[in-house]
Image (cartoon, rainbow, N blue to C red):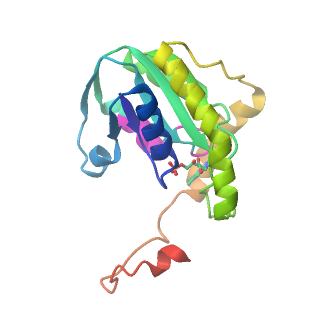
Amino acid sequence: MIVFFSGTGNSEYCARYIAKLIGDDVIDSAQFIRNKQIAQLVSEKPWVFVTPTYAWKIPKVFTSFVRQSSLTGCKSAYFVMTCGGSVGGAASGALALCKEKGLRFKGLMPIVMPENLITMFKAPEPDEAEKIIEKATPVIEKAAELIKAGKPFEKLKYNFLGFLESELSNPLFYKAATNAKKFYATDECVGCGLCEQR
Ligand SMILES: Cc1cc2nc3c(=O)[nH]c(=O)nc-3n(C[C@H](O)[C@H](O)[C@H](O)COP(=O)(O)O)c2cc1C
């Protein structure tokens, strides 16, 4: 079963593409997260968790979702993480999560997709985004092929930079850059969508 979390659609796109290639079901974790509902999921096929990278790690909200969910059936788990450039040392967090859940970690595949951290970087223009997705396509297909064959993903090198990014910078980043105070709506909001375009 493919379980995804997606802020702006990149991870959902990858999840649905993999699902199509391997012929498996897709679940959007947002439906549970939004309703504060504990998921009770059953899968005879490997778990494939597809998520964006937030500060070189799996987003906290998705880690909590996986941690709290009941996952019955298959004991193997793959992680596919979309990113703007690098997942840092995210694999060690994914491995730890698997250990916690009694799952066998089959690896983490980073997929470079269009950047969406627009508070820090410029989002790519549509033609540039198309090229990035084109480049990502064989990587997504490779991931699907390995999942279908039950083979592990290639092991990612864990280096000191990855450790610094995921273990030291991540908490600082969350503290400094991930608060939603500036995103709010008043009763005057008519849902025109103008703010989205700015
Ligand atoms: C809060 C936040 C933190 C991010 N941190 C990273 C990061 O550490 N490394 C990276 O390569 N991309 C990072 N990104 C970019 C996203 O991981 C990337 O654009 C991803 O494909 C978005 O997927 P989505 O459309 O499914 O939300 C970050 C984006 C956001 C919003």
In the orientation shown, which residue stands out farthest toward the bottom? 188
In front: 193, or 179?
193
Residue 89 occupies which quadrant of the picture? top right
Q: Position of residue 30 (x, y in %)?
A: 34, 47
In the orientation shown, which residue stands out farthest toward the right? 160
Q: Position of residue 126 (x, y in %)?
A: 63, 63
Q: Is residue 146 left or right of residue 29?
A: right
Q: Position of residue 48 (x, y in %)?
A: 43, 28
Tell me: residue 99, above or below residue 20.
above
The image quadrant where one finds the C terminus is bottom right
In front: 19, or 97?
19
Asked whether residue 61 is drawn in magenta, I would say yes
Tell me: residue 198, above or below residue 8.
below
In front: 172, or 188?
188
Q: Is residue 76 left or right of residue 174?
A: left
Residue 57 occupies which quadrant of the picture? top right
What residue do we see at 59% from left, 57% from top? Answer: 116
What residue do we see at 38% from left, 20% from top? Answer: 101
Q: Is residue 166 visible?
A: yes
What is the tally of numbered marks visible in this picture?
Answer: 0
Q: Position of residue 151 (x, y in %)?
A: 53, 12
Q: Is residue 123 visible?
A: no
The image quadrant where one finds the N terminus is top left
What residue do we see at 24% from left, 50% from top? Answer: 35
Please state the extent of the stretch shown in magenta in the rendering: 54-65
Asked whether residue 29 is drawn in magenta, I would say no
